[in-house]
Image: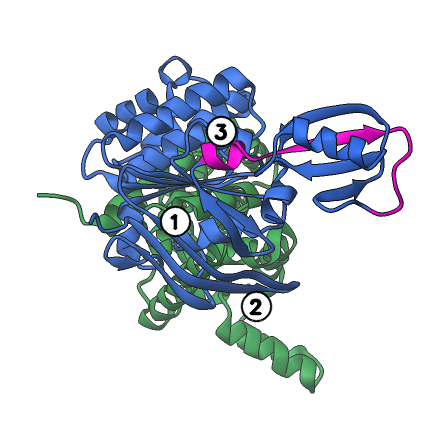
Amino acid sequence: MIPPAVSLSRVGWVGRTGRVLDGVDVEVVPGEIVAVVGAPASGKTTLLRVAAGITRPHAGTARVGSWEATDPDARRIVGYAPQDPAWLAAFTVRELLEYWGRFHVRGDPAAAVRDALAVAGLEANAADAIRNADAGVRRRLALAQAVLGGRRVLILDELLTGLDPALAQELAWRIESRTAAGVAVLISAGALEAVERVATRVVLLSRGRVVRAGAPSALMSERVLDVVLERPPLAAPAGFRLTPFGLRADLNRVTPEAVLAACRAHRLAVRASHVRHKSLEELSAG
Amino acid sequence: MTTPPFIRHSLAEWKPVSAQVRRTRLGIWLAAIVVGAVWIAGRPDGVFLPTFALGVALTAVVTAASALAGRESARAAALTLRHPASPVALAAGRWVGVILIASIVTFLASVGAAWRIELGWRDGAGAALGATCVALPIAACALAAARLGGGVLEWLFLAFLLLVSTLVPEATAYVPDGVLREATLAMLVTLPAIWRYRLLAAGDPVAWIHALSWTAAGILITAESLRRRVP
């Protein structure tokens, strides 16, 4: 069995407003991409900060390789891209990476910087001033600074969220290419769609707890049927949930045809219906 | 032979320092200090070069520290701490950066002033060297003040240095007896003060111990402030 590169066990964290993480278990083995997905304020960023050793857990343990995540030695192998990185606007892209490179590489960091630029696809933007960089370049730069110095673990907070599909796809491919070299990746996202193509495993977080975990394809295959009725009933029949415009049925064990037949059996006039993927809330609710 | 990590990480700080001097308003402000100081030195009554150099050095220190320890660069430094660097190395590197900037500005202004008052460049350089000695602890404390209280605390610190700390402790005899006198005396004796640091250039050991203690304290306070801001 391959030892995990990141191991979070029974992690708990309490913030000013209450419990943020509650007994979270996550493991990432080398070569794996684990996505932590959840609604805003579900605890994703806190979980990633614990894994990156920025925040010490209030309960449980967080380990990176053979070190505690907060051990300064762990910084040599962990690359962290925060959701809202702060960069000196006076730098160019290359200067910024050279600056960070000095902390990782003895002597001239030029080779490490060149590798990081190549991994993030930033070669053409190396001379761009950061103050003028667009969102795409900034996101690539976040990836470049995280991989700089050949890190073995990448912790990427919302790196693929809010990008245009082409760039998201390209960055996903670039992240994936790191795993071929045995790099372990822990990435967060606010929606399953952002990580479905890149993640090997998804951990669904809700109110600081892991509510579901599995392959993204399995979670994405879970569907519901929304039925719009002429006159919604006062109470939902068995197997349905009431919605403002009609009923909703889980399609885990039944077909859409069977659901519509059940509507007819209950003498409910169907105006329209459509099948869709489950939302995060629905997946969290099981 | 490889450079020890602490030195390497401290030296790395020169990169953001030079980028800010070249590409932000900091460079313009520093140039304005040199030009303004040389212009002032050309007044008919001239200037007393050591005091003049000290004023330029302290203004340059506070201006540079304000820019280099400002919110944006502090956040950037905090992100740097995610890489294997110690906050003390970063703070020490910034302190060196502030000193370098202040010494260059002071040298240019002092040599320019010496030329305007028809003294030799060596007189200007000597005054600049003495002022740079005084700037060593002041730069560390200015960085700490900028981190703890922002620009306001830093400029208050400069005002204290220029207006109050030039007085020797014996001068408090003229302050009315009571809490004010005791507080002024305590500040003059314990805080970084010009009256004491004027003795640095003469090699006074007490002044050097005081200055080095405040240099270390300023760097450590700045380092702790950076460490707390790790994203």
Return the chain for callout 3: A
Chain drawn green in the picture:
B
Amino acid type shown at disc 2: Leu
Residue B139 % position (x, y): 45, 53
The image quadrant that residue A91 belongs to is top left
In the image, the segment drawn in magenta is A216-235
Q: Nearer the viewer, mark 3 or mark 2?
A: 3
Residue beneath disc 2: B167
Residue beneath disc 3: A90
When the figure is inspected, residue A195 is found, relative to residue A37, above or below; the finding is above
Q: Nearer the viewer, residue B168 or B104?
A: B104
Residue B144 % position (x, y): 50, 58
Return the chain for callout 2: B
Residue beneath disc 1: B81
- The residue most toward the top is A124
Chain drawn blue in the picture:
A
Residue B194 % position (x, y): 50, 62
Residue B196 % position (x, y): 45, 67
Return the chain for callout 1: B
Q: Nearer the viewer, residue B3 or A280?
A: A280
Amino acid type shown at disc 1: Leu
